[in-house]
Image (spheres, grey):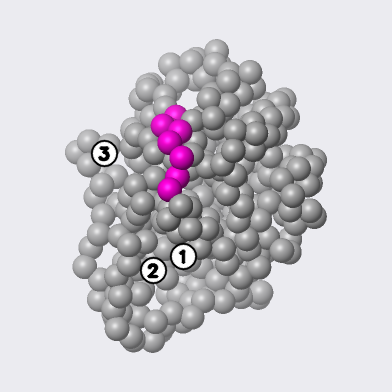
Amino acid sequence: MSYADKVNETSCHNKLEASAYDYRELVRYATLAASSHNTQPWLFKLESNRIQILPDLSRRCPAVDPDDHHLYASLGCAAENLLLAAQAAGLAARCRFDASTSGVQIDFEEAAAARSALFDAIPLRQCSRSAYDGVPLMSNEMDQLQAAGHGDGVLMLLLTSADQKNLVADFVARGNDAQFADPAWARELKSWIRFNAKEAGLSGDGLYGPAMGNPDAPRWLGQLAMKRAFSAKNQNRKDRRHISSSSAIAVIYSQADDIQHWIEAGRCYQRLALQATALGLRTAFINQPVEVAKLRVEFARAIGIGDRRPDFIVRIGRGPEMPRSYRRPVEDVLR
Protein backbone atom coordinates (compact mmCIF):
# COMPACT_ATOMS: atom_id res chain seq x y z
CA MET A 1 0.00 0.00 0.00
CA SER A 2 1.37 3.43 -0.95
CA TYR A 3 1.95 6.30 1.47
CA ALA A 4 -1.06 8.17 0.08
CA ASP A 5 -3.29 5.10 0.40
CA LYS A 6 -2.26 4.61 4.02
CA VAL A 7 -2.93 8.25 4.86
CA ASN A 8 -6.30 8.14 3.10
CA GLU A 9 -7.20 5.02 5.09
CA THR A 10 -6.68 7.02 8.29
CA SER A 11 -8.13 10.30 7.03
CA CYS A 12 -11.54 9.23 5.80
CA HIS A 13 -15.17 9.44 6.84
CA ASN A 14 -16.63 6.36 8.53
CA LYS A 15 -20.11 5.67 9.80
CA LEU A 16 -20.78 7.30 13.16
CA GLU A 17 -23.28 6.10 15.73
CA ALA A 18 -24.25 7.65 19.05
CA SER A 19 -23.00 4.93 21.37
CA ALA A 20 -20.24 4.49 23.89
CA TYR A 21 -18.66 1.96 21.52
CA ASP A 22 -18.22 4.71 18.95
CA TYR A 23 -16.09 6.95 21.16
CA ARG A 24 -12.94 5.51 19.60
CA GLU A 25 -14.15 6.77 16.24
CA LEU A 26 -14.63 10.22 17.73
CA VAL A 27 -11.04 10.03 18.95
CA ARG A 28 -9.86 9.14 15.43
CA TYR A 29 -11.43 12.33 14.10
CA ALA A 30 -9.83 14.27 16.94
CA THR A 31 -6.36 12.96 16.02
CA LEU A 32 -6.69 14.50 12.54
CA ALA A 33 -6.30 17.93 14.15
CA ALA A 34 -3.27 20.17 13.85
CA SER A 35 -0.27 20.09 16.20
CA SER A 36 3.15 21.74 16.20
CA HIS A 37 5.65 19.61 14.21
CA ASN A 38 2.82 17.04 14.02
CA THR A 39 3.82 15.88 17.50
CA GLN A 40 0.22 14.88 18.37
CA PRO A 41 0.71 15.72 22.07
CA TRP A 42 -2.61 14.39 23.34
CA LEU A 43 -4.06 11.48 25.29
CA PHE A 44 -7.75 10.53 25.42
CA LYS A 45 -9.48 8.98 28.40
CA LEU A 46 -12.83 7.36 27.56
CA GLU A 47 -15.51 7.25 30.26
CA SER A 48 -19.25 6.75 30.38
CA ASN A 49 -20.75 9.70 28.46
CA ARG A 50 -17.44 11.55 28.64
CA ILE A 51 -14.07 11.94 26.94
CA GLN A 52 -11.12 13.71 28.53
CA ILE A 53 -8.36 15.15 26.33
CA LEU A 54 -5.13 15.30 28.34
CA PRO A 55 -1.69 16.76 27.56
CA ASP A 56 1.05 14.29 26.69
CA LEU A 57 4.06 16.12 28.09
CA SER A 58 6.42 13.46 26.75
CA ARG A 59 5.88 15.11 23.36
CA ARG A 60 6.95 18.59 24.39
CA CYS A 61 9.07 20.76 22.09
CA PRO A 62 10.93 22.90 24.63
CA ALA A 63 13.05 24.77 22.08
CA VAL A 64 10.29 26.06 19.84
CA ASP A 65 7.54 25.95 22.49
CA PRO A 66 9.16 26.53 25.89
CA ASP A 67 5.94 27.48 27.72
CA ASP A 68 3.95 24.63 26.06
CA HIS A 69 1.58 27.10 24.41
CA HIS A 70 1.40 25.13 21.15
CA LEU A 71 1.05 21.85 23.03
CA TYR A 72 -2.03 23.02 24.92
CA ALA A 73 -3.45 24.75 21.86
CA SER A 74 -3.25 21.38 20.09
CA LEU A 75 -5.64 19.98 22.71
CA GLY A 76 -8.11 22.64 21.60
CA CYS A 77 -7.61 21.69 17.95
CA ALA A 78 -8.38 18.05 18.80
CA ALA A 79 -11.38 19.07 20.91
CA GLU A 80 -12.91 21.05 18.04
CA ASN A 81 -12.68 18.07 15.68
CA LEU A 82 -14.13 15.80 18.34
CA LEU A 83 -17.07 18.13 18.99
CA LEU A 84 -17.92 18.30 15.30
CA ALA A 85 -17.73 14.51 14.99
CA ALA A 86 -19.92 14.08 18.08
CA GLN A 87 -22.54 16.38 16.59
CA ALA A 88 -22.52 14.34 13.37
CA ALA A 89 -22.92 11.17 15.46
CA GLY A 90 -26.00 12.48 17.27
CA LEU A 91 -24.36 13.59 20.50
CA ALA A 92 -24.79 16.97 22.15
CA ALA A 93 -21.50 17.87 23.82
CA ARG A 94 -20.53 20.22 26.64
CA CYS A 95 -16.86 21.19 26.53
CA ARG A 96 -14.96 22.78 29.40
CA PHE A 97 -11.41 23.38 30.55
CA ASP A 98 -10.45 21.12 33.46
CA ALA A 99 -7.93 22.95 35.63
CA SER A 100 -7.18 19.78 37.62
CA THR A 101 -5.69 18.08 34.53
CA SER A 102 -4.91 21.16 32.39
CA GLY A 103 -6.97 19.38 29.77
CA VAL A 104 -10.41 19.34 28.22
CA GLN A 105 -13.47 17.51 29.50
CA ILE A 106 -16.29 16.77 27.05
CA ASP A 107 -19.61 15.40 28.32
CA PHE A 108 -22.21 13.87 26.02
CA GLU A 109 -25.91 13.28 25.80
CA GLU A 110 -27.96 11.99 22.87
CA ALA A 111 -29.37 14.51 20.41
CA ALA A 112 -30.38 14.79 16.78
CA ALA A 113 -27.48 14.17 14.43
CA ALA A 114 -26.29 17.24 12.50
CA ARG A 115 -23.56 16.88 9.91
CA SER A 116 -21.84 20.17 9.09
CA ALA A 117 -19.56 21.43 6.32
CA LEU A 118 -16.79 21.78 8.91
CA PHE A 119 -17.15 18.13 9.90
CA ASP A 120 -16.97 17.11 6.24
CA ALA A 121 -13.74 19.13 5.93
CA ILE A 122 -11.91 17.31 8.76
CA PRO A 123 -10.17 14.67 6.58
CA LEU A 124 -9.33 17.28 3.93
CA ARG A 125 -7.71 19.94 6.12
CA GLN A 126 -3.96 20.16 5.87
CA CYS A 127 -1.14 22.60 6.46
CA SER A 128 -0.30 23.47 2.84
CA ARG A 129 3.29 24.73 2.78
CA SER A 130 3.23 25.98 -0.80
CA ALA A 131 2.77 29.19 -2.78
CA TYR A 132 -0.84 30.29 -3.30
CA ASP A 133 -2.40 32.18 -6.21
CA GLY A 134 -2.76 35.55 -4.46
CA VAL A 135 -6.35 36.09 -5.61
CA PRO A 136 -8.23 38.27 -3.07
CA LEU A 137 -10.89 36.66 -0.92
CA MET A 138 -14.52 37.47 -1.60
CA SER A 139 -16.49 39.36 1.06
CA ASN A 140 -18.60 36.33 1.96
CA GLU A 141 -15.45 34.24 2.41
CA MET A 142 -13.97 36.91 4.67
CA ASP A 143 -17.17 36.97 6.74
CA GLN A 144 -17.22 33.18 7.21
CA LEU A 145 -13.54 33.07 8.14
CA GLN A 146 -13.99 35.91 10.63
CA ALA A 147 -16.90 34.11 12.29
CA ALA A 148 -14.96 30.84 12.52
CA GLY A 149 -11.83 32.39 14.04
CA HIS A 150 -13.47 33.98 17.08
CA GLY A 151 -14.14 32.25 20.41
CA ASP A 152 -14.51 32.80 24.14
CA GLY A 153 -11.84 35.39 24.91
CA VAL A 154 -10.16 34.81 21.54
CA LEU A 155 -10.29 37.16 18.55
CA MET A 156 -8.87 37.23 15.03
CA LEU A 157 -7.48 39.80 12.62
CA LEU A 158 -7.47 39.28 8.85
CA LEU A 159 -4.64 41.16 7.16
CA THR A 160 -5.03 41.55 3.40
CA SER A 161 -3.12 44.61 2.16
CA ALA A 162 0.37 44.44 0.64
CA ASP A 163 1.72 46.64 3.45
CA GLN A 164 0.27 44.33 6.10
CA LYS A 165 1.70 41.25 4.41
CA ASN A 166 5.09 42.93 4.13
CA LEU A 167 4.96 43.74 7.84
CA VAL A 168 4.25 40.10 8.67
CA ALA A 169 7.03 38.96 6.31
CA ASP A 170 9.51 41.26 8.07
CA PHE A 171 8.66 39.79 11.47
CA VAL A 172 8.77 36.24 10.08
CA ALA A 173 12.26 36.95 8.73
CA ARG A 174 13.41 38.22 12.12
CA GLY A 175 11.92 35.10 13.70
CA ASN A 176 13.79 32.89 11.24
CA ASP A 177 17.04 34.71 11.99
CA ALA A 178 16.59 34.06 15.71
CA GLN A 179 15.50 30.43 15.39
CA PHE A 180 18.15 29.34 12.89
CA ALA A 181 20.78 30.84 15.18
CA ASP A 182 19.62 28.57 18.04
CA PRO A 183 21.31 25.12 17.91
CA ALA A 184 18.70 23.61 20.25
CA TRP A 185 15.88 24.76 17.98
CA ALA A 186 17.63 23.29 14.93
CA ARG A 187 18.24 19.93 16.65
CA GLU A 188 14.64 19.74 17.81
CA LEU A 189 13.21 20.51 14.37
CA LYS A 190 15.46 17.94 12.69
CA SER A 191 14.41 15.30 15.23
CA TRP A 192 10.79 15.61 14.03
CA ILE A 193 11.52 15.47 10.28
CA ARG A 194 10.63 12.22 8.53
CA PHE A 195 12.59 12.21 5.28
CA ASN A 196 10.69 9.36 3.60
CA ALA A 197 7.45 7.39 3.72
CA LYS A 198 9.02 4.47 5.61
CA GLU A 199 10.18 6.73 8.44
CA ALA A 200 6.83 8.51 8.58
CA GLY A 201 4.96 5.22 8.61
CA LEU A 202 7.04 3.77 11.44
CA SER A 203 6.64 6.79 13.72
CA GLY A 204 3.13 7.88 12.71
CA ASP A 205 4.06 11.45 13.53
CA GLY A 206 6.46 14.25 12.62
CA LEU A 207 6.99 16.35 9.51
CA TYR A 208 6.98 14.24 6.35
CA GLY A 209 9.46 15.71 3.85
CA PRO A 210 7.14 15.94 0.81
CA ALA A 211 4.50 17.67 2.97
CA MET A 212 7.03 20.49 3.30
CA GLY A 213 7.78 20.55 -0.42
CA ASN A 214 10.86 18.29 -0.30
CA PRO A 215 11.30 15.00 -2.19
CA ASP A 216 10.94 11.61 -0.51
CA ALA A 217 14.56 10.60 0.08
CA PRO A 218 16.72 8.19 2.10
CA ARG A 219 17.66 9.69 5.45
CA TRP A 220 21.32 10.13 4.54
CA LEU A 221 20.41 12.02 1.36
CA GLY A 222 17.72 14.07 3.08
CA GLN A 223 20.13 15.07 5.83
CA LEU A 224 22.77 16.05 3.26
CA ALA A 225 20.29 18.17 1.29
CA MET A 226 19.01 19.75 4.47
CA LYS A 227 22.52 20.59 5.63
CA ARG A 228 23.16 22.45 2.39
CA ALA A 229 19.83 24.32 2.30
CA PHE A 230 19.20 24.82 6.02
CA SER A 231 19.64 28.56 6.57
CA ALA A 232 17.65 31.59 7.63
CA LYS A 233 18.45 33.22 4.29
CA ASN A 234 16.87 30.42 2.28
CA GLN A 235 13.88 30.19 4.60
CA ASN A 236 13.32 33.94 4.47
CA ARG A 237 13.32 33.89 0.69
CA LYS A 238 10.76 31.09 0.67
CA ASP A 239 8.56 32.62 3.37
CA ARG A 240 8.44 36.04 1.71
CA ARG A 241 7.34 34.42 -1.54
CA HIS A 242 4.67 32.38 0.24
CA ILE A 243 3.37 35.32 2.26
CA SER A 244 3.12 37.60 -0.77
CA SER A 245 1.21 34.87 -2.64
CA SER A 246 -1.39 34.56 0.12
CA SER A 247 -4.84 36.08 -0.09
CA ALA A 248 -4.89 36.94 3.61
CA ILE A 249 -2.95 36.49 6.83
CA ALA A 250 -4.98 35.59 9.92
CA VAL A 251 -3.70 36.42 13.40
CA ILE A 252 -5.53 34.67 16.22
CA TYR A 253 -4.96 36.31 19.61
CA SER A 254 -6.18 35.89 23.17
CA GLN A 255 -7.49 38.30 25.79
CA ALA A 256 -5.54 36.46 28.51
CA ASP A 257 -2.26 34.53 28.45
CA ASP A 258 -3.08 31.24 30.20
CA ILE A 259 -3.66 27.58 29.38
CA GLN A 260 -7.43 27.92 29.19
CA HIS A 261 -7.14 30.62 26.52
CA TRP A 262 -4.41 28.71 24.66
CA ILE A 263 -6.79 25.75 24.36
CA GLU A 264 -9.58 28.05 23.20
CA ALA A 265 -7.22 29.59 20.63
CA GLY A 266 -6.55 26.07 19.34
CA ARG A 267 -10.27 25.50 18.91
CA CYS A 268 -10.53 28.78 16.99
CA TYR A 269 -7.59 27.92 14.74
CA GLN A 270 -9.03 24.49 13.95
CA ARG A 271 -12.42 25.99 13.17
CA LEU A 272 -10.79 28.62 10.95
CA ALA A 273 -8.77 26.00 9.07
CA LEU A 274 -11.82 23.78 8.59
CA GLN A 275 -13.90 26.72 7.37
CA ALA A 276 -11.16 27.63 4.93
CA THR A 277 -11.02 24.04 3.72
CA ALA A 278 -14.80 23.99 3.25
CA LEU A 279 -14.44 27.11 1.07
CA GLY A 280 -11.75 25.47 -1.08
CA LEU A 281 -8.93 27.46 0.54
CA ARG A 282 -5.56 26.34 1.89
CA THR A 283 -3.90 27.35 5.15
CA ALA A 284 -0.40 27.17 6.62
CA PHE A 285 1.24 28.36 9.83
CA ILE A 286 3.87 31.12 9.79
CA ASN A 287 4.29 31.27 13.56
CA GLN A 288 7.89 32.47 13.88
CA PRO A 289 6.95 35.91 15.33
CA VAL A 290 4.86 34.31 18.09
CA GLU A 291 7.40 31.58 18.85
CA VAL A 292 10.29 33.97 19.52
CA ALA A 293 9.30 35.55 22.84
CA LYS A 294 11.16 38.84 22.38
CA LEU A 295 9.41 39.39 19.03
CA ARG A 296 5.94 38.46 20.22
CA VAL A 297 5.26 41.64 22.20
CA GLU A 298 6.66 43.83 19.45
CA PHE A 299 4.61 42.03 16.81
CA ALA A 300 1.42 42.40 18.86
CA ARG A 301 1.88 46.13 19.11
CA ALA A 302 2.82 46.46 15.43
CA ILE A 303 -0.49 44.91 14.33
CA GLY A 304 -2.52 46.93 16.82
CA ILE A 305 -3.58 44.37 19.44
CA GLY A 306 -1.69 46.01 22.31
CA ASP A 307 -0.59 43.73 25.14
CA ARG A 308 -2.71 40.74 24.10
CA ARG A 309 -0.91 37.54 23.16
CA PRO A 310 -0.87 36.57 19.46
CA ASP A 311 -1.37 32.80 19.39
CA PHE A 312 -1.13 31.88 15.71
CA ILE A 313 -0.30 33.45 12.38
CA VAL A 314 -1.90 31.65 9.44
CA ARG A 315 -1.57 32.11 5.68
CA ILE A 316 -4.79 31.66 3.69
CA GLY A 317 -5.27 31.32 -0.06
CA ARG A 318 -5.83 28.99 -2.98
CA GLY A 319 -3.09 26.57 -3.86
CA PRO A 320 -2.23 22.95 -4.68
CA GLU A 321 -2.99 19.99 -2.47
CA MET A 322 0.11 18.76 -0.67
CA PRO A 323 0.94 15.28 0.70
CA ARG A 324 -0.68 14.68 4.08
CA SER A 325 0.95 13.62 7.32
CA TYR A 326 0.44 10.36 9.16
CA ARG A 327 -1.42 10.07 12.44
CA ARG A 328 -0.75 7.55 15.17
CA PRO A 329 -3.32 4.76 15.67
CA VAL A 330 -6.13 5.41 18.12
CA GLU A 331 -4.77 2.68 20.39
CA ASP A 332 -1.58 4.68 20.87
CA VAL A 333 -3.37 7.78 22.18
CA LEU A 334 -5.81 6.15 24.61
CA ARG A 335 -5.01 6.39 28.29
At x 50% / y 15%, what residue is drawn? 224
- Please identify, in this view, whether the residue under mark 3 or under mark 2 is nearer the observer: 2
Q: Which residues are magenta?
A: 129-138
Q: Which mark is residue 141?
A: none
Measuring from the top left, give residue 199's x and y in whole percent.
38, 34
Amino acid bearing label 3: Ala
Q: Is residue 163 magenta?
A: no
Measuring from the top left, give residue 103's x and y in whole percent.
58, 69
Q: Quadrant of the N terminus?
A: top left
> In the picture, residue 302 is in which quadrant?
top right
Toward the viewer: 199 or 247? 247
Total tally of numbered discs in the picture: 3
Outermost front residue: 139
Is the C-beta separation of discs 3 and 1 under 8 Å? Answer: no
Report the predominant secondary structure element of the magenta stretch. loop
Residue of label 3: 4
Q: Is residue 183 visible?
A: no
Disc 3 from disc 1: Cα separation:
25 Å
The relative height of residue 49 versus residue 317 in the rendered view (above or below) is below
At x 52% / y 58%, what residue is drawn? 146
Q: Is residue 59 rendered to the left or right of residue 92?
A: right
Q: Is residue 130 magenta?
A: yes
Q: Is residue 14 visible?
A: yes
Residue of label 2: 84
> In the picture, residue 128 is in which quadrant?
top left
Residue of label 1: 80
